[in-house]
Image (cartoon, rainbow, N blue to C red):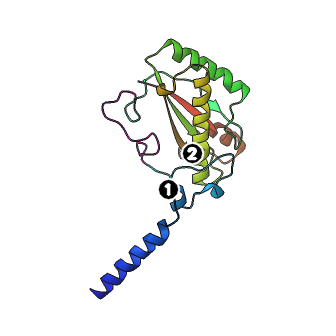
């Protein structure tokens, strides 16, 4: 019984020290801004559950178009958007693809869009998750400027978790630095 009290006391003390001075989850896990380059920003803790809170957010039952409720439209595909190494800016050739997607979405108001950000295998899991998020948000922001309502788009980052191709060379990495645009309802 005495040992149980000591363990409990030490555990409570450790939790107090661990959480004191931490204002965000990123601070708790040590993923503050210093852990990720300035131009990429901090990221959420990694999760292997595609419906986890923090990826698309918590599903909101009864609210149409909320994360977790959209399902991909079978047989409908949009072009893949590719990125330069360590970048979230959309290149000129990729902008033309997004303009076509925006035109389609504006003409088909019942189609929504899930934007998945992906990275190649280089960099830490946290860094790649954050970079994938920046890529997805960059596309969402670009499409919003073209007139697609923000409420019709969801973003998610898979970082390096779902490579398009296997390999550890530039040709594989170039195909994995991408965003997948998934039409959904």
Q: Is residue 58 magenta?
A: yes
Question: How far apart are the alpha carbons under marks 1 and 2?
Answer: 19 Å
Q: Residue at x 55, y 23 (%)?
A: 78
Disc 1 versus disc 2: nearer the observer: 1
Q: Nearer the viewer, residue 31 or 79?
A: 31
Q: Residue at x 64, y 22 (%)?
A: 97
Answer with left or right where residue 8 lies relative to residue 72.
left
What secondary structure is the magenta-colored segment mainly? Answer: loop
Q: Secondary structure at mark 2?
A: strand
Q: Is residue 41 above or below residue 9?
A: above
Q: Is residue 101 above or below residue 141?
A: above
Q: Nearer the viewer, residue 15 or 98?
A: 15
Say how many tags the image has.
Answer: 2
Percent from the top left, x then y, of residue 142? 62, 27
Q: Is residue 168 above or below residue 117?
A: below
Percent from the top left, x then y, of residue 106? 53, 15
Q: Which residues are magenta?
A: 49-65
Answer with left or right where residue 43 lies relative to residue 75.
right
Percent from the top left, x then y, of residue 1? 26, 85
Q: Residue at x 32, y 86 (%)?
A: 3
Q: Is residue 140 magenta?
A: no
Q: Nearer the viewer, residue 145 or 115?
A: 145
**Pointer 1: what residue?**
25
Asked whether the residues under the numbered discs 1 and 2 touch, taking CB atoms below 8 Å apart as contact, a structural biologist would say no
Viewport quadrant of the C terminus: top left
Q: Residue furthest top?
A: 107
Q: Nearer the viewer, residue 21 or 18?
A: 21
């Amino acid at each position: 019984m005495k040992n149980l009290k000591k363990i409990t006391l030490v555990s409570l003390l450790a939790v107090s020290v661990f959480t004191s001075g931490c204002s965000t989850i990123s601070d708790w896990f040590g993923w503050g801004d210093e852990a990720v380059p300035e131009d990429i920003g901090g990221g959420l803790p990694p999760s292997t559950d595609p419906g986890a809170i923090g990826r698309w957010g918590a599903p909101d039952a009864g609210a149409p178009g909320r994360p977790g409720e959209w399902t991909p439209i079978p047989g409908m595909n949009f072009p893949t958007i590719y990125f330069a190494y360590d970048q979230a800016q959309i290149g000129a050739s990729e902008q033309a693809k997004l303009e076509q997607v925006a035109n389609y979405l504006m003409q088909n108001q019942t189609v929504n869009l899930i934007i998945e950000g992906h990275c190649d295998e280089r960099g830490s899991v946290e860094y790649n998750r954050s970079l994938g998020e920046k890529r997805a948000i960059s596309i969402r922001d670009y499409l919003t400027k073209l007139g697609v309502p923000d409420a019709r788009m969801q973003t998610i980052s898979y970082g390096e978790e779902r490579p398009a191709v296997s390999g550890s060379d530039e040709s594989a990495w170039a195909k994995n630095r991408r965003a997948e645009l998934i039409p959904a309802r």
